[in-house]
Amino acid sequence: MATGQLFSRTTQALFYNYKQLPIQRMLDFDFLCGRETPSVAGIINPGSEGFQKLFFGQEEIAIPVHSAIEAACAAHPTADVFINFASFRSAAASSMAALKQPTIRVVAIIAEGVPESDTKQLIAYARANNKVVIGPATVGGIQAGAFKIGDTAGTIDNIIQCKLYRPGSVGFVSKSGGMSNELYNTIARVTDGIYEGIAIGGDVFPGSTLSDHVLRFNNIPQVKMMVVLGELGGRDEYSLVEALKQGKVSKPVVAWVSGTCARLFKSEVQFGHAGAKSGGELESAQAKNQALRDAGAVVPTSFEAFEAVIKETFDKLVEEGKVKPVKEITPPPIPEDLSTAIKSGKVRAPTHIISTISDDRGEEPCYAGVPMSSIIEKGYGVGDVISLLWFKRSLPRYCTQFIEICIMLCADHGPCVSGAHNTIVTARAGKDLVSSLVSGLLTIGPRFGGAIDDAARYFKDAHDRGLTPYEFVENMKKKGIRVPGIGHRIKNRDNKDKRVELLQKFARTHFPSVKYMEYAVQVETYTLTKANNLVLNVDGAIGSLFLDLLAGSGMFTKQEIDEIVEIGYLNGLFVLARSIGLIGHTFDQKRLKQPLYRHPWEDVLYTK
């Protein structure tokens, strides 16, 4: 491995298996360091393509998303680092695929628990092809002021405190990602900071070793000393011992192997990492520390003394003139995310939508404050749900039953009415369910099913003003307005709409008052003197009876009733009900495999 620097201020990476937070942290670090280009060139998310919006400082940018590793590498040939956030189940396969790409030089594997046999294959391939594997079970690595992998070094506050926004003189390598953060802070307190830091990972077989990176640091002129944090278990530290004995390392190495407390336990102890388990005296922390000390590394007597010996070694380099003072800079502030700023009480932001009928936050959705579980437990029906979502209150059972009756009676009126006809024609044209449904719904209006609100509005106004049926009808005639809710193309005095009769029967039995319905019946009596088909139709029946429901329930003010009629609530009942029938006609045509409809010539009057 050896060679030298892995990363620079122009290094770009491909990020596998999209994770918003680590990518945003990388981009925030870029901005903090004053990079001109984002360090994440592209995202690989198997099965999806497009763009992902993220922030680069104050600017929102779109990072390309690719579905395959090969496509991403081809689209971003300068991106030579592959950051793999795949699970342990697929990390090996995706990492091998990345290593086989000629553009990829470094692969970082974040997942823990990658099968050891798979890891060995990755290591062998990387070494044979002069590539670098960091991990598995790693947080990644960082070059101060230049580039960082994923969540390395944690939050922006920690990065600033550790002065990682500009390069120092110390090369650091550790097995532990968590302890890396601790040591970055320690090193920043007693030296000029990190130049590069790597966490090789805590699995038994890391893709690269402590000595690999120490030897590499030794070749980087800006690195003046190395700090190494090992741990009990395995024999990785002994490769560093051999390198020191053979004189391959010319710069000071300060080292400590954690896990000296293991001897206090009577039985063998497995610490946090898979590799942190002593397999004998040679793998103990004490033996490794002594071997490193004997080979020439600066090894403290305890972890508590680690900081002091790092400081002592650095101060000596300064005295010898081997370390030049680092010019301190003030990093730019990272714009705070709106959600974070709102939570901390720093800003107020207006909402974009107001909703008063439902709430999907918490353990379960609520309709008008009623939890979903209560709706089911209390045996609520569709009418009850409509009362909650439309009227924002639980209406009496007779009201919700009336709503359900309206839906059942208006669900369909045969294939010949305009809405059903449009839906059938559309379905036979091979269109999908939604298109066919909408085609039928768009015919609803003043002439087809959309007169319920108008009927309620006019009946209410006439009744409340005390107009006689004669005055009401004749006034409408003078204005050139047909009376909504009156008239039918098929039904007449001797063949009244059965639906109207059923609605009236239910209301007379259950409603406290039916004054508006009775007024509509009186209007019908008068209009029948003019024409045999000017009967009260289903629109008029629902419109007048809904007025009785709203007024008789005692749960609505006059202003609320006027608003309900004005907004179009009552037509909503017809839209909801007829949707059931239109969907049925769509399925019927598809089930029957009906061909494209063409209107017959004989049913068209061709004229000049």
Image: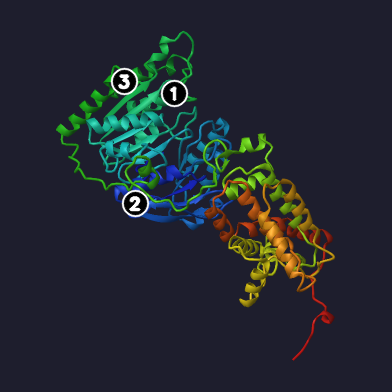
Could you tell me residue 500's position as x and y percent?
A: 76, 58
Label 2: which secondary element: loop
Viewer-side residue, 348 vs 598? 348
Mark positioned earlier in the residue sequence (3 or 2): 2
Q: Is residue 149 visible?
A: yes
Residue designated by label 1:
235
- Answer few, some or many: residues within 10 Å of disc 3's Cα (few below 14, many 20 plus, some between 14 and 19): some
Report, in whole angstroms, how far the alpha carbon at label 3 lies from the one at label 1. Answer: 20 Å
Residue designated by label 2:
57
Q: Is residue 497 above or below residue 141?
A: below
Mark positioned earlier in the residue sequence (3 or 1): 1
Could you tell me residue 430's position as x and y percent?
A: 74, 65
Q: Is residue 249 visible?
A: no
Report, in whole angstroms, how far the alpha carbon at label 2 lies from the one at label 1. Answer: 43 Å
Q: Residue at x 61, y 63 (%)?
A: 466
Tell me which colouring the rendered structure shows. rainbow
Instruction: Give amino acid for label 1.
Output: Arg
